[in-house]
Image: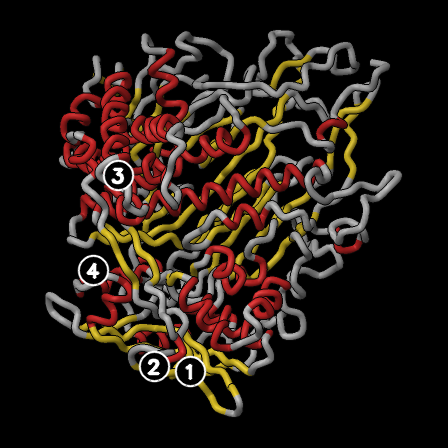
C-alpha cells in the first residue's frame, strides 16, 4: 500500500519542484524529483523487512506486467556449443542495396572518414551490457547507447556507407580486472558473474574477492583501409562514474520514521477471513515528503549548485578518447564464433512478432527501431435513421516509412492467415538472442523471451510498443516524425513542395492528418514512458545498491471505446445479456498496456535490496503510466494505481479498505463511491490471487479521478431507443490492485476501465477524424 502512495507522491513532488526555473545542464527537473523521493527505495526495503516473516505465494509465471528474472551463468564455450552452434545460420540483410537515410547522412556528415566514424561511435554511444543486436544501428544512433552488437552494426553500416569493406567479428574478449572495472564498474566476482549472466552475456569471471580476469561474449569490427585490415572495437570504452549522494541525510528524511507515519492506519482487521487496513495516513506521508523535498531543494541550490546531474544522482559518462585510432582495441579479442562480411546472422538479432485478427508481421528490431508500428482496423460507426452499424476499411499492419521486405506477403503487408485470433486481441512476441534457459531448465535460448496477449479496440489505430534497454528522449522526436506509412506514394507532402490543394491533405508540419496526429501522440506517450523509466532505474540503482538491466517493454497504446448497450429493462444499467448497439460510442480514451522484463543484481549480495528495487521500479512505472498523460496532454483525470489508491483514501475514507487477497480467499464487500450499488463492474483481483499471487486491492469499484470525453447518448433513434452506458457512467473510473509473488520477480499494477483489466494506465482521448464520424445524422 505504501509503495503506491509513495509513487504518487513522487509525482506530486516532481511537479512542485519543476517551478524552479534556473537549472544547470542536464535534466535537473528529473534529478530533483527523483532525488527528493529516493528515500522511496529505502522506505520500501524497510516496509518489506517488516513483513518478511509472512511467506508470500510464489506465483506461476503467468502474471502480466513486470518480470524480474535472473539468468543461469553460462561460459562462452557452453553457450556456443549448447545454443549458437546449433541455431539456424540464416542471414536476413535488407540494407545491402538501400541503407536508411540516417546512416548515409551521418557517414556524409563525418566526411566518410573512417577515423572520424570510429571516434563518433567510440566517444558518443554508451555501452549497454546485454548480448546480441537489439535496437541495432538506428537505435544506437537515436538513444546514443547500445549493446556491443548494436555498436558493431552501427560502425559497420557507417563504414560501408562511406565506401569501405567492413565485417562483423563475433567471439570473446578477455580483460584484466582493472580493464573490466574501467568499463563496467564492477570488482566483485560474484556480482560480475550474475550481472553478465543477466545481460545474456556468456562469461567466465576469475578471482576470489576481487576480479582478476574476465572472458565474455563480444562483437567488434574489421575494416579494410588502403588494402590493410584494421580491427576496431567500438563498444569497449572507459567510463567516469559518480556515486549518488545520501539523499535521505541531505533531505533530513528518516526512512523508519516515514514508514511509521505512512503505515500507521487508523484501523485494521479481517473481513470473511481476509485481512485489510483502512485510514492510511496519506496526509502525514505527503507532508513528510514535501518537507524533505524543500530541504533537499535548498541543498541543491547551495551545496550542490555547481554539480552535474551525474554527481548528484549517480551515473556515468564516457571518458572521451582524444585519439581512439591509437588504441582501437582493448584486451584480447578472439573471433572464434565467426566473421561475417554481409549481414549479422539472425541468431544474434532480436525478433519481434505481432499477430492480430488474421494478420502477422515478423520483424527484426534493428530494422524498425524509431518508426511507428501501427495496427489498423476498420472504422465502425452508427448511421441512421434507423440506427445501423457501418464498417469501412481493412485490417493491416503498417510501419512508418514502409515495412522491410519479407515481413509480410503483399504490398500492404497484411500477411493474412486463418483461423483468426479473437477480435481485438493482439499477440506480441519478443525473442531475444540469449543462450540461457528459462529457469535454468528446458531448451536453451528461451530465457527472457515473452509472449503478451493484449486487447485493443477496433476503429482507431493502435500503436505497437517495443522498447529495448536504455531509451533517450530523442526517441519521442523520431516517433513524432511526419513521415507516415503512405506518404512516400503521395508526392508533395514532406519534400518542400507547397501544400496539396482540393480534396488532398497536407500531412506535413505543423498540422498533419488527424489520424496521423493521434498515432504520434500514442507513440510519444510510450516513448516518454521508456525514457523516464530509464532515468528512474538509474536513480533506483544508486538508492538500492543494485545494478538493473531493462531487456524489453512490449505492449500497445490504443483508443478504448465505451459503447452503448440496448437497455432492454429500462433500468439504466448494463445488465448481463443486453447487447451492444452496433457502431455506437459513448466515450473514448487512450490506454497504455505494457509488459516489461528487467534483471536486478545486488552489489552487496543482499536479497532485500533486490526485492526493494523491484517494487520501486514497478511503482515508478505505475506512476508514469498515468502521469505521461498529464505531461503530454495537460490532462487532469488520468488512471493508474498511483492515482486511484490515494483517491480512495481521500474521498471514501469512511468505507475504503485495502484488502490483502490470497489464493482461495473468501469474497469481500465492494462499494461504489462508498455505498452499495448494482452499477459498475466488480473488481476481480481475487481471480489473480487464485493464480498463486498476493493481491492488494481497494474495495471500491468506482475509483477516480474521472473524466468524460462524451459523444452523448443518441436518443429517439430506432430500434435502439432505450440505451445505457457500457459498464458504468464514466469509463475512466474503476478498480485498482497490485499483484506480486514472493520474491517480487512478477509484479503487476492493474487498473480497470469498463470491464477490462489493464497492466498500465490511461487518460482522455481526443476525437479523431475517424471517430468524428460516429454520430447520428442531422435528421435523427
Tag 4's secondary structure?
helix
What residue is drawn where x is 23% and y is 63%?
192
* Outermost residue toward the right in this view: 502
Q: Residue 278: horizontal and vertical position, in percent?
A: 26, 16
Q: Is residue 207 visible?
A: yes
Tag 2's secondary structure?
strand
Name which of mark 3 and mark 2 comes first in the sequence. 3
Query: Distance between the Cα atoms at labels 3 and 2?
Result: 46 Å
Disc 4 designates what residue? 191
**Viewer-nearest residue: 216 or 389:** 216
Pointer 3 and pointer 2: residues touching (CB < 8 Å)? no
Which of the two marks, 1 or 4, is nearer to us in this view? 1
Disc 3 designates what residue? 57
Disc 2 designates what residue? 333
168 left or right of 76 in image:
right
Q: Residue 741: horizontal and vertical position, in percent?
A: 29, 40
Amino acid at each position: 500500500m505504501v509503495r503506491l502512495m509513495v509513487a504518487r507522491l513522487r509525482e506530486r513532488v516532481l511537479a512542485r519542484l519543476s517551478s524552479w526555473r534556473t537549472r544547470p545542464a542536464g535534466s535537473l527537473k528529473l534529478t530533483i524529483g527523483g532525488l527528493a523521493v529516493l528515500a522511496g527505495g529505502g522506505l520500501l526495503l524497510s516496509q518489506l523487512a517488516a513483513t518478511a516473516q509472512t511467506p508470500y505465494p510464489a506465483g506461476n509465471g503467468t502474471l502480466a506486467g513486470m518480470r524480474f528474472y535472473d539468468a543461469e551463468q553460462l561460459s562462452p564455450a557452453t553457450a556456443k556449443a549448447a545454443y549458437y552452434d546449433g541455431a539456424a545460420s540464416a542471414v536476413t540483410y535488407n540494407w545491402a542495396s538501400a541503407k536508411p537515410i540516417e546512416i548515409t547522412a551521418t557517414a556524409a556528415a563525418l566526411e566518410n572518414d573512417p577515423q572520424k566514424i570510429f571516434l563518433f561511435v567510440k566517444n558518443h554511444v554508451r555501452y549497454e551490457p546485454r548480448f546480441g543486436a537489439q535496437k541495432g544501428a538506428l537505435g544506437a544512433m537515436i538513444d546514443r547507447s547500445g549493446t556491443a552488437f548494436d555498436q558493431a552494426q552501427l560502425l559497420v553500416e557507417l563504414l560501408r556507407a562511406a565506401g569501405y569493406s567492413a565485417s562483423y567479428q563475433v567471439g570473446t574478449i578477455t580483460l584484466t580486472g582493472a580493464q573490466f572495472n574501467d568499463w563496467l564498474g564492477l570488482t566483485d566476482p560474484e556480482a560480475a558473474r550474475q550481472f553478465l549472466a543477466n545481460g545474456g552475456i556468456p562469461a567466465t569471471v576469475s578471482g576470489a574477492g576481487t576480479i582478476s580476469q574476465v572472458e565474455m561474449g563480444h562483437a567488434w569490427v574489421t575494416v579494410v583501409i588502403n588494402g590493410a585490415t584494421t580491427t576496431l572495437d567500438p563498444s569497449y570504452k572507459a567510463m567516469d562514474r559518480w556515486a549518488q549522494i545520501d539523499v535521505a541525510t541531505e533531505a533530513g528524511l528518516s526512512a523508519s520514521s516515514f514508514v511509521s507515519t505512512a503505515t500507521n492506519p487508523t484501523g485494521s482487521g479481517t473481513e470473511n477471513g481476509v485481512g485489510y487496513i483502512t485510514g492510511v495516513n496519506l496526509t502525514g506521508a505527503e507532508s513528510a515528503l514535501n518537507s524533505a523535498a524543500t530541504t533537499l531543494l535548498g541543498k541543491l541550490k547551495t551545496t550542490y549548485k555547481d554539480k552535474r546531474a551525474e554527481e548528484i544522482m549517480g551515473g556515468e559518462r564516457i571518458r572521451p578518447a582524444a585519439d581512439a585510432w591509437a588504441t582501437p582495441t582493448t584486451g584480447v579479442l578472439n573471433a572464434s564464433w565467426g566473421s561475417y562480411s554481409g549481414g549479422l546472422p539472425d541468431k544474434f538479432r532480436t525478433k519481434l512478432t505481432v499477430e492480430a485478427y488474421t494478420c502477422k508481421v515478423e520483424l527484426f528490431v534493428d530494422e524498425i527501431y524509431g518508426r511507428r508500428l501501427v495496427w489498423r482496423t476498420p472504422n465502425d460507426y452508427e448511421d441512421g435513421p434507423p440506427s445501423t452499424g457501418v464498417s469501412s476499411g481493412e485490417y493491416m499492419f503498417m510501419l512508418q516509412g514502409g515495412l522491410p521486405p519479407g515481413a509480410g506477403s503483399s504490398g500492404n503487408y497484411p500477411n493474412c492467415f486463418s483461423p483468426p485470433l479473437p477480435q481485438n486481441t493482439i499477440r506480441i512476441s519478443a525473442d531475444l538472442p540469449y543462450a540461457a534457459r528459462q529457469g535454468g531448465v528446458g531448451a536453451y535460448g528461451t530465457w527472457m523471451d515473452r509472449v503478451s496477449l493484449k486487447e485493443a479496440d477496433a476503429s482507431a489505430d493502435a500503436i505497437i510498443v517495443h522498447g529495448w534497454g536504455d531509451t533517450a528522449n530523442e526517441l519521442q522526436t523520431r516517433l513524432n516524425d511526419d513521415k507516415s506509412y503512405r506518404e512516400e506514394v503521395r508526392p508533395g507532402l514532406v519534400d518542400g513542395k507547397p501544400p496539396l490543394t482540393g480534396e488532398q491533405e497536407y500531412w506535413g508540419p505543423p498540422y498533419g492528418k488527424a489520424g496521423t496526429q493521434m498515432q504520434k501522440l500514442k507513440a510519444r506517450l510510450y516513448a516518454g514512458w521508456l525514457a523516464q523509466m530509464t532515468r528512474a532505474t538509474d536513480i533506483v540503482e544508486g538508492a538500492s545498491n543494485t545494478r538493473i538491466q531493462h531487456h524489453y517493454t512490449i505492449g500497445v497504446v490504443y483508443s478504448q471505446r465505451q459503447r452503448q448497450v440496448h437497455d432492454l429493462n429500462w433500468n439504466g444499467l448494463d445488465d448481463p445479456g443486453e447487447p451492444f448497439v452496433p457502431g455506437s460510442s459513448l466515450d473514448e480514451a487512450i490506454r497504455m498496456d505494457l509488459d516489461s522484463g528487467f534483471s536486478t543484481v545486488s552489489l552487496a549480495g543482499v536479497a532485500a535490496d533486490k526485492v526493494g528495487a523491484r517494487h520501486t521500479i514497478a511503482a515508478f512505472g505505475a506512476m508514469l503510466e498515468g502521469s505521461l498523460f498529464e505531461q503530454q496532454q495537460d490532462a487532469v483525470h488520468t488512471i493508474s494505481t498511483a492515482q486511484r489508491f490515494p483517491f480512495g483514501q481521500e474521498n471514501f475514507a469512511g468505507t475504503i479498505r485495502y484488502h490483502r487477497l490470497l489464493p482461495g480467499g473468501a469474497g469481500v464487500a465492494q462499494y461504489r463511491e462508498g455505498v452499495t450499488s448494482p452499477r459498475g463492474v466488480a473488481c476481480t483481483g481475487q481471480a489473480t490471487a487464485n493464480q498463486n499471487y498476493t493481491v492488494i486491492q481497494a474495495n471500491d469499484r468506482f475509483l477516480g479521478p474521472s473524466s468524460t470525453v462524451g459523444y452523448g447518448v443518441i436518443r429517439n433513434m430506432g430500434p435502439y431507443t432505450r440505451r445505457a452506458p457500457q459498464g458504468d457512467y464514466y469509463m475512466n473510473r474503476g478498480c485498482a490492485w497490485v499483484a506480486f509473488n514472493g520474491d517480487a520477480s512478477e509484479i503487476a499494477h492493474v487498473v480497470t476501465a469498463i470491464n477490462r483489466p489493464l497492466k498500465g494506465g490511461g487518460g482522455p482521448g481526443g476525437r479523431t477524424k475517424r471517430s468524428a464520424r460516429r454520430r447520428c445524422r442531422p435528421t435523427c
